Amino acid sequence: MKITLDILQVLMLILGAPLVHGIIARLKARLQRRRGASIWRPYAELFKLLRKEELVPPTSSAVFRLAPIVLFGATVCAAAFVPVVHASALLGSRGDFFLFVYMLVLGRFFLSLGALDGGSAFGGMGASREALVSSLAEAPFLLGLVAIAVLATRADIAGMVAWTLEQNIFNISAVHILALTSLAMVILAETGRMPVDNPTTHLELTMIHEGMVLEYSGRSLALVEWASAIKLHTMFALLIALFFPWGMAFSVSGWGVVVALLLYCAKTAVLMILLSVIESAVAKLRMYLVPDFLGVASALSALAVIFTMWVKR
Amino acid sequence: MLTGPIGAAFVFLLAVLSVLVPLILIASRAEGARRLAVALIVTASFAGCVVAVSSFLRQPGPVLDLSRATPFPFSLAVDRLSAFFLLLVCAVAIPVTIFAAPYFDLHYSERRRNWTWGFFSMFLLSMIVVVTAATGFAFLVGWELMTLVSAGLILIEGDSTERRHNVFIYLLMMHVGAAAVAACFFLFLPYSHSLDFGAIRAACLGMPGGIRAAIFLAAFVGFGAKAGLIPMHLWLPRAHPIAPSPVSALMSGIMLKTAVYGFVRFAFDFLAGGPWWSGYVVLVVAAVTGLLGILYAIAENDLKRLLAYSSVENIGIIFLGLGTSLMFLAHGAPLGAALALVAALFHAFNHALFKSLLFLGAGAISNSTDSVNLNELGGLQRRMPFTGAAVLIGCCSIAGLPLFNGFVGEWLTFRSFLAGSTLINTKAQIILPLMVGILALIGGLAAACFVKTFGMAFLGRPRSTGSEQAEEAPIGMRVGLALLSAGCLAIGILPGLLLRPLVTLVQVLVPGAGVPEETLSIARIIPWTAAIVLGTGALVALFKRRERIARTWACGLPGLTSRMQYTSTVFSKPIRFVFARVYRPDRKVEELPADQHYFPVSISYRSVRTTSYERALYRPFVDGVVSLAYRLRRLQTGNIQVYLLYIFLALVSLLTFLRFQR
């Protein structure tokens, strides 16, 4: 029973991901006084791309074709680490957060290689910028998680979530606030959202993620887009699980799971609204201000780790 | 002691490398003789692997005592720590030798080939002597031989002034290191009365703290110079790139590990942990080494120099583990110490595999394209798919990606940092978890560095005619590459293969440790993640896919050219920009003609990194020594009366000294 629920959680993160993208696009459109497309549009787009013929640059090699597959596989594997409706996940209690973060690195590594294999100027541009952002984002990401892990004295994500569930919501410490802030900043950078990267742009001066996927089409593009949607959804689920897990089912009972699922949807909705407000209100940072942005995140997460010394009993 | 088949195999290993192979090569210059020599080296290395594995499983291992024939006690013994490093040396030696056979044939004239193989064999022998030495004398003999023979191997490739200068720096720094190592043994001598390792170990218990601290520092400096810890890394990016690629593979892959072996032998086996501050010192030096090493690597465009700097980085990661282990020992937490030590040794083994793989890959590239400049490569994956696949595995491993072996070592180091938070009443409980951030930064930059390396060399369009006309490497080279990449994959997916024996080994070095739980959990989880990643990948690869080759739209131009691609220099530009304070670049832009600013005929741009350790650290030291020597020269006037006065003064002062001593 438990394992079924764990698998359902992963499927939910994977299959629900395009919907999250769709809702955010719709919310942003509304905030910008446009009507916006249907929230189901990303699914239609995926189906369309999966059916279409793929155009491949003549100079590209097997790496170009392999990259989206590895990216997708690694992202799905990362999704299997995160608890959604109960404090457990398929790999959540055996694997720890280091493995989770490095799974995402694996995907990104291959996507960058695929971008370079396109042989055009934009792929290299995207890969080079991605290299900068991701290499600087890794430290605050891990440090923020370390702070929570030190408090919970566990390193597996499911264990950390279970520990948080036992705490009182009013009993949160400075460590949590600092870690939450830094992780939220890192997630904006990792998933390529504003102010670090603009997911809707195709202007060569600014694009990072879009530059990397410019040469992709057909099935490969579908996999890349789906994987980035899964990544965003997984990150939302991670934030919720680590900082607002209250309401998750303690045991695998019918009603508990239903309530937990509804609460999860509500929490995700709040995050989606926040993200679309940020994306509509904030201008994109200049490329060389991104290190400052991530530097602030690193400082916050380092502070979070330092403060654990006093919070821990 | 030398009984049974294992003893015989050990003698066979030493005899082949020291006597048989050189004799064959001296006796004959025929092609067949060389083939025989190569076959013998491979067989001997295989015998070495067997000796290592069996003496690891069944202690005591073989002991070879030659003390009667040598002026000082000289004996070799294979205990568990030696067996582990013997396996490392021999396991990497096999693929490198197989690779080197066609490589040396293609690159050297007949006469040089014999010399090269002779030195090659002696180089392997010297490293085996170092890791199996059971007396200080044997250790120092092996240590010295290793330096000299590798210098010889570098000089075989050519002897231009620049090369000689680099080799000179290499030899100089190695001898400073060797002096420090020798000093360690002399510091032991008054207490142990013998250079035998057993006696030294026993004597360590009763030594005063000051002497122990001095030995620790001398060992750290001595082995740190060999390992290439910053700022003693100066020789490494000079010596490794100019050696022939298989020799670079041995130097980076194995020779650096002998320094790790030496440090573990001294700090853990003999001293059983240093003074309380030792962990902090090692940790700080290691963090600086790792961070600066990878930053310098990412700015390099010469593939072999890039790999050399990345060796500096990886040595940093290994010493991060060792420093953490010392810290745990100082705080009386053997379990954490065991975990961190396992992490360091595990990473040392992995680095031997993937770094020699990458250096061999660089050899295959230079063999096919006559260049190792990343700005001249590109598009090789389509031309050399096999080499490309092997190098890709190496790049993934060294970047620390999960499912490859580099990840497991970094993961263990991460977890040992995290375990530091369980220490109580010490600053270490904060410092160690914060080190996660440093290692994460190193890991992130390493991933960026090896995206660049693989992307620039193998992907996209070729940037020169050399890489345009490149052909796949010959079969011997491919076998060498395949063996090493298979090793990386096997340990990456089934880390338990190596972790279980390592845990056993660490029980000996850190008494009372028990089995760290993390080593079990990683071995359990990695195959599952591999199954999920590969399963999902296979599932989506089943989706129907039609493909058409189409030229990329080039904004209306006739077509894309390789000059429109990002180059290696440009790729690393954002990172070099952000870390400009580290590189302190010196840029020169020259426009011709100089007066026409808006319509120049040609613009040349040059940017050089100016963080020079020679200028900032070594030059003042050398200047100081030289000026002191000049000052002392005034004593020598050439006047015989003055010399008589010196003798008289010396006599008087000696007599005075004796008078007051009584």
Image (cartoon, rainbow, N blue to C red):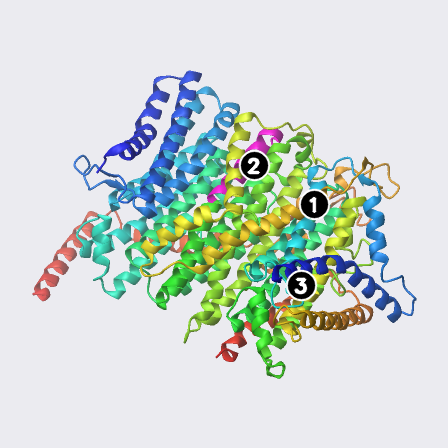
Q: CA distance from mark 2 to mark 1?
A: 34 Å
> Which mark lies nearer to you, 1 or 3?
1
> Which mark lies nearer to you, 2 or 1?
1
Question: What is the secondary structure assignment of the residue under circle 1?
Answer: helix
Of the residues shown, which amino acid type is indicated by label 2? Ala
Q: Where's residue B589, x and y in %?
A: 70, 49
Please rate how many residues cluster around mark 3, counting C-alpha atoms within 10 Å: few if below 14, some from 14 to 19, many from 20.
some
Identify whether B378 is placed above or below B111.
below
In-image side of B603 versus B330 (left or right): right
**Main SS, magenta residues:** helix
Which label belongs to residue B539? 1
Tell me the residue at 53%/34% (across/down): B481
Q: Nearer the viewer, residue B363 or B94?
A: B94
Q: Nearer the viewer, residue B406 or A71?
A: A71
Span shown in magenta = B352-371
Q: Earlier in the sequence, mark 2 or mark 1?
A: 2
**Which subunit holds the residue at mark 2?**
B
Any part of residue B361 in sight: yes
Residue B355 sits inside the magenta stretch: yes
**Which subunit holds the residue at mark 1?**
B
Give the residue at mark 2.
B362
Which label belongs to residue A291? 3
Of the residues shown, which amino acid type is indicated by label 1? Leu
**Which subunit holds the residue at mark 3?**
A
Identify whether A290 is placed above or below B300.
below
Q: Nearer the viewer, residue B179 or A271?
A: A271
Tell me the residue at 35%/51% (across/down): B505
